[in-house]
Image (spheres, grey):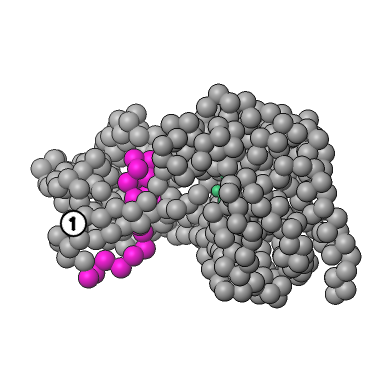
Amino acid sequence: MKASGPAFLFVRRTSSGAAPLPFAEALEQVRRDLARYAEKDTLFATHLEIADDPLLRETVEKYISDGLTEQKAIEAACAQICQTFTEIDDEYLRARVDDVRDVFNRISRAVAGETTANVDVPRGSILVAEELLPSDTVSLDFDHLAGIICHRGSTTSHVCILARSKGIPIAVGLPINAIRPGDIVEVEDPLVGTLPIAEKVRKAGRKLFANAGSVQDIRNAMKAGADGIGLFRTEFLFLSRPDMPSEEEQEAIYRNAIEACNGKPLTIRLLDAGGDKALPWHSPEQEDNPFLGVRGIRLLLANPEILRAQIRAILRAAADTKMTGETRIMIPMVTRIDEVRTVRDMVSSESDLLEDVNGSIPVEIGAMIETPAAVLNAVELAAACDFFSAGTNDLTQYVMAADRGNAAVSYLYDALSPAMKKALEMTVDAARSAGIPVGICGELASDPRATELLLGLGFDSLSISLS
Ligand code: PEP
Ligand code: MG
């Protein structure tokens, strides 16, 4: 999601007016404030825990008894505790350093008799800050913000979590020196809107995968913490050039993709061309109904040399990176079992033919469930597959007989219609009975309103779009 607007440069303001407090009383006041904030925003519960931790009190008191002033003792204790956090090899816990510093800042301000003053931000502004601490978020009216740019901070910081949960795009780690007040600036944040989905999926113990259309997308998804790639659309390799990509070119890309996944599962979808996606170097027969014509696996079976080259390239890449995570081959537009069997046979014969490979190549083969025939035949299909993935973008158009690009029938194109719910239920049930995992990679997975339903239906993974 993108937002643009005039820059508002954030400056933290404190006003001294409150009475300075001794450390113990300051700590008590901060505890009370945090308990109040935590009632409205659960993220402050972490701050309350930090303030409650005896280690905080004991460390400050030790420095005071060593002869430091209260302010110096707070600074020294903060530095000591933050140091131990920075050494932790876990991004989430490392990001909690900001929380620790923020709690110490609060205590320090209470000892000095300072309070944080509210900052009035004009509506529609992009807030530009060197750093935003959780306590700053209390002094800001988030409803006025169109976006946020921070120079310092991590993607898992409190302010990122809070902003995204409110649908406000936020970018961290950007240089801000050249931005002047009122400059029109733009923030792009692919993670806005996905946070509530991620939380629910993780809570339910399921996998959060991402959809990708390039190796860069995979890298971004891994950075954003995805558990794997549930749909790698390989079309970009085939559609944007005047000739067919060679097996070697494809192999290089798939190897990069597998490596970018860092040991996590990668679901490579076989070329899904045809329909509205024409291959520039291939002239098919003119079709009256291209969406009911030679698309997806049909096009590949009609042109086995394309299928064979893609399979060989995937196998070579997977063999080369055997030590990494699971590589999955996903078949688009499946309607009949023999389509899966043909792909499986080709995978096993090509695997045997690859002379430079020792032993078998670990790939899984699965079907996209995106046609009514695949749903109605899901029980039989599951017996031939290692996994299922519901492609609700196409499934909706075929179940509802409503072109996914035709605005005049968009009222029928409803991925949550009763007919679609039944179709999804049948898909999950068939996978369950066969003991194979079932995911969803259509856009419905990226709709926060559908998350509970999809988890309730029993999907093992949701593969969401990050852009
Ligand atoms: C789908 O049909 O749901 C899907 C994920 O594939 P595409 O949108 O690429 O057709
Ligand atoms: Mg599709």
Question: Does residue 282 appear anywhere in the picture?
Answer: yes
User: Is residue 334 highlighted in magenta?
Assistant: no
- Which residue corresponds to the image point at 17% horizontal and 45% vertical from the top-left? 123
State the image quarter where residue 152 is shown: bottom left
Q: Amino acid at mark 1?
A: Pro
Apparent side of residue 80 relative to residue 150 in the rendered image (left or right):
right
- Which residue corresponds to the image point at 52% horizontal and 36% vertical from the top-left? 402
Q: Decide: few, some or many residues near mark 1? Use Cα within 10 Å; few <14, some 14-19, many ≥20.
A: many
- Which residue corresponds to the image point at 52% horizontal and 30% vertical from the top-left? 416
Q: Which residue is mark 1?
A: 6
Apparent side of residue 243 relative to residue 50 in the rendered image (left or right):
right
Q: Position of residue 437 (x, y in %)?
A: 72, 40
- Which residue corresponds to the image point at 53% horizontal and 46% vertical from the top-left? 464
Question: Does residue 449 appear anywhere in the picture?
Answer: no
User: Seen from this angle, which residue lies furthest left?
Assistant: 17
**Relative to 205, is 111 above or below?**
below
**Relative to 85, is 313 above or below?**
below
Foreground residue among 411 and 467: 411
**Relative to 378, is 329 above or below?**
below
User: Seen from this angle, which residue lies furthest top?
Assistant: 418
Magenta stretch bounds = 157-178
Q: Position of residue 367 (x, y in %)?
A: 71, 45
Q: Position of residue 2 (x, y in %)?
A: 33, 53
Apparent side of residue 246 relative to residue 79 in the rendered image (left or right):
right
User: Is residue 166 highlighted in magenta?
Assistant: yes
Q: Secondary structure at mark 1?
A: strand
State the image quarter where residue 44 is shown: top left
Q: Position of residue 360 (x, y in %)?
A: 86, 61
State the image quarter where residue 267 is shown: bottom right
